[in-house]
Image (spheres, grey):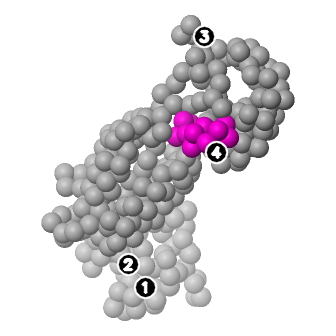
Amino acid sequence: MDHLGALGAFVQAAETRSFTEAGRRLGVSSSAIGKAVARLEERLGVRLFHRSTRAITLTAEGSLFLQRCHRVFAELEVAERELTQAAGKPQGKLRISLPQLGVRLMPHLIAFQQAYPAIELELDFSDRLVNVIEEGFDAVMRIGEVQDSRLVMRALSGFSHRLVAAPSYLARHGMPAHPLELATHACLHYRYPTSGKLDPWPLVERGEPLHLDLPQTAVTNAIDPLLAMAEAGQGIACLPDFVVAEAIAKGSLLALLASYVEDRRTLCILWPSSRQPLPKIKAFVNFIAQRLATPMA
């Protein structure tokens, strides 16, 4: 077996924990698998498997090498798809990672599904900073710019935050006229699930940030519960404008302290750099960029 074939033999043996089963999958004998693995171990200078009469198990070095091999074969698969699909129509599985706020983009994602039925969409909603290439994502959507030379970035749209409260809450507790008055109000906060940090409220006065120790009446790691609590009159929340736009329009929430709230955040899409992006990635980027060409609110 050549070098790549030896890697394939190792991966199959590692995944099946059997030279016999690996040989069956590859259409060769178990002894051929064993010899290929032995030559690979000799070339690398390490043992990849613990062997017994009943089973084989990976060594620590073998486990690490298996992860590397998976990346190698994943890159080969992408290269093959680039060559075979470069001129073809968008199709196949498309893995996209989005922040939790991306749930609010579902109308756009559903529209994409309807426009490209040959694409199998797999969505991962998480605020953690995923490794696009190593975790096998085709593209990620993130808030703010991400510096990675292996990725191409395109800014999509922007949004701001608003302080909001229900009319029923303000009727009971009054409308704050200055951020300092928030100390006597029920404040509803968002906590990042990955870092555990509270999302700071972007309060300013005369262009200078205000760092206030606000009450933590309720804290959640998801946006929708904050919206629900605010609409139910449980306190004041700081939420993206596109999340509260409908509630403000129908009067279930009121914006407050607008002149003291100042921020601007950008939603970006990133994908692995390539001279010829796969049609499915190109289609997704162009579609979403067109849909989000205007502010999200």
| Mark 1–mark 2 CB contact (< 8 Å) | yes
The spot of residue 145 in percent (x, y) is: 41, 35
Residue at figure coordinates x 30%, y 76% from the top left = 5
The spot of residue 234 in percent (x, y) is: 80, 38
Farthest-out residue, left? 87
Q: Could you say which disc has been placed on residue 155 in the image?
A: none
Instruction: Specify which label sits upstream in the sequence, 2 or 3.
Output: 2
Q: Is residue 248 magenta?
A: yes
Query: For the residue carrying disc 4, how many other residues have a C-alpha within 10 Å: few (<14), some (14-19), or many (20+)?
Result: many
* Residue at mark 1: 22
Q: CA distance from mark 1 to mark 2?
A: 7 Å
| Mark 2–mark 3 CB contact (< 8 Å) | no
Q: CA distance from mark 3 to mark 4?
A: 26 Å
Q: CA distance from mark 2 to mark 4?
A: 47 Å
Residue at figure coordinates x 48%, y 27% from the top left = 264
* Residue at mark 2: 9
Instruction: Specify which label sits upstream in the sequence, 1 or 4.
Output: 1
Instruction: Specify which label sits upstream in the sequence, 1 or 2.
Output: 2
In which quadrant of the rendered view does residue 94 lie?
bottom left
Q: Is residue 82 left or right of residue 208?
A: left
Query: For the residue carrying disc 1, how many other residues have a C-alpha within 10 Å: few (<14), some (14-19), or many (20+)?
Result: many
Instruction: Specify which label sits upstream in the sequence, 1 or 3.
Output: 1
Q: Which residues are magenta?
A: 240-253
Q: CA distance from mark 1 to mark 3?
A: 67 Å
Query: For the residue carrying disc 3, how many other residues have a C-alpha within 10 Å: few (<14), some (14-19), or many (20+)?
Result: few
* Residue at mark 3: 205
The answer to whether residue 70 is seen in the rendering is no
The answer to whether residue 99 is seen in the rendering is yes
Q: The disc labelled 2 sits on which kind of residue?
A: Ala
Q: The disc labelled 3 sits on which kind of residue?
A: Glu
* Residue at mark 4: 223
